[in-house]
Image (cartoon, helix red, strand yellow):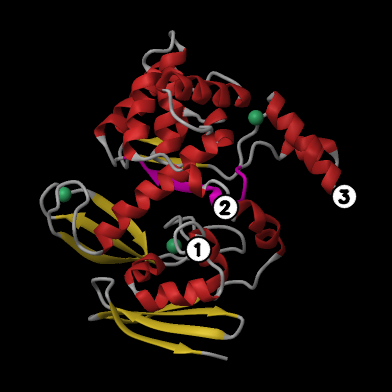
Amino acid sequence: MSHHNQPATEWANRHRRALTTRHTHEDVLTDRQFELLLEACLTLPAPHDFEARFICLIAGRLGLRAGEIAHFQTAWVNWNRRTIRIPQHEPCRCGYCRRQARQETTHNDDLSIEDAVASRWHPKTVASARLIPFDLSLRLELCIERFANRYDAFPRSRSTINRRVEAAASAANLPGRVYPHCLRATAASYLKHRIMSAVEGVCPDCTGTMSVTPQVCGDHHVEPGRRCESCDTIFEVQFTIVCDVCQLMYGVPSNRCLLTEPRMLVFLEDHDYDPWYDWILIELEVVERQTTLSEDPFELEMVLEVDGDRLVVTLDEKGAVTTLHRVPR
Ligand SMILES: [Zn+2]
Ligand SMILES: [Zn+2]
Ligand SMILES: [Zn+2]
């Protein structure tokens, strides 16, 4: 089984800039600043206190964008799997969506205002329609439960989100500007440390050992610009990493198992990809294909390619790199 990634398609190019906004790197909050921010949410008058806490937690720990939070629906939550599904499309005619639709028509002569409004709301990029596990922490889980007890959908407008974050940051006396996108960068940095620890076999919660098993999607099918309906990712192999002690679980796309490999980091840096912030782009543009060479013992081959420069890697059933060759053009 193999999947050939489509060449840099129009939609990938169109969204490239949006995905590589780098200016927020410096604005990542430290763990201490993030705790202070959450604490300060509680000092705001009700119901701003809860709204601010909900926004800060799902942006700062799960990485939801402001536009996604403004359209958040309790129906996106799967309580059994403890996941949030950001849909590819959800009908909406709110003020924000109407403004966005108008803006989209100014960049595209073929698009009528009715069609643009009819296609709202959609997430920022095709790749950002996704499934997000929220079982990282009990307080996150409880916060989403409390939200669901009160609301079917986020009760405020898009612009309220910035105001709540600003109010909490000012109550916390945090230096610099704090805004939703820097909370998203904070989530990326937080997850990076946790996932890398898991990939290296150490539980980020309890320091217990973690066990890895490959998951191969049995019914894998990908249309250009979409994820597979059955496994919800682009590629058919993921590694599930579970803590032997506390059962903390992560599903990690196979290419991210390579991020502990220095030669992979050099390869990405040579081609101007940031290994930590460009991972969606890396999946779309760099991972050329992955092929299950053998089911038992499990062996996966991945081919990464940029401008004719190739990296050919094999992974074993633990997601560990067994061979790695760089083939320059
Ligand atoms: Zn809307
Ligand atoms: Zn699949
Ligand atoms: Zn653990």
The residue closer to the viewer here, 63 or 252, is: 63
Q: In this rendered view, identify the residue nearer to me: 17 or 168.
A: 168
Q: Which residues are magenta?
A: 123-134
Mark 3 or mark 1: whose residue is earlier in sequence = 3
At label 2, the amino acid type is Arg
Contact flag, marks 1 and 2 (Cβ < 8 Å) = yes
**Which is nearer the N-term, disc 1 or disc 2?**
2
In the rendered image, is residue 153 in sight?
Answer: no
Q: Would you name the residue on which mark 1 appears?
A: 274
In what quadrant does ligand 1 lie? top right
Q: Who's the residue at 42% across and 15% down the image?
A: 49
Judge by depth and name the residue closer to the eye, 129 or 276.
276
On residue 22, the disc is 2
Q: Residue at x 43, y 30 (%)?
A: 56
Marks 3 and 2: which is nearer the front? 2
Quadrant (top left/top right/bottom left/bottom right) for the C terminus:
bottom right
Q: Give the residue number, with chain letter if any, for mark 3.
A: 110
Measure the C-alpha gap from mark 1 to mark 2: 10 Å
Three-letter code, disc 1: Asp
Q: Earlier in the sequence, mark 3 or mark 2?
A: 2
- At which x and y percent is residue 270? 52, 76
- Taking 209 as reference, is 281 left or right? right
Amino acid, disc 3: Asp
Which label sits on residue 79? Answer: none
Within 10 Å of the Cα at label 1, are there few (<14), some (14-19), or many (20+) other Cα atoms? some
Comparing marks 3 and 1, which lies closer to the viewer? 1
Q: Is residue 275 above or below residue 77?
A: below
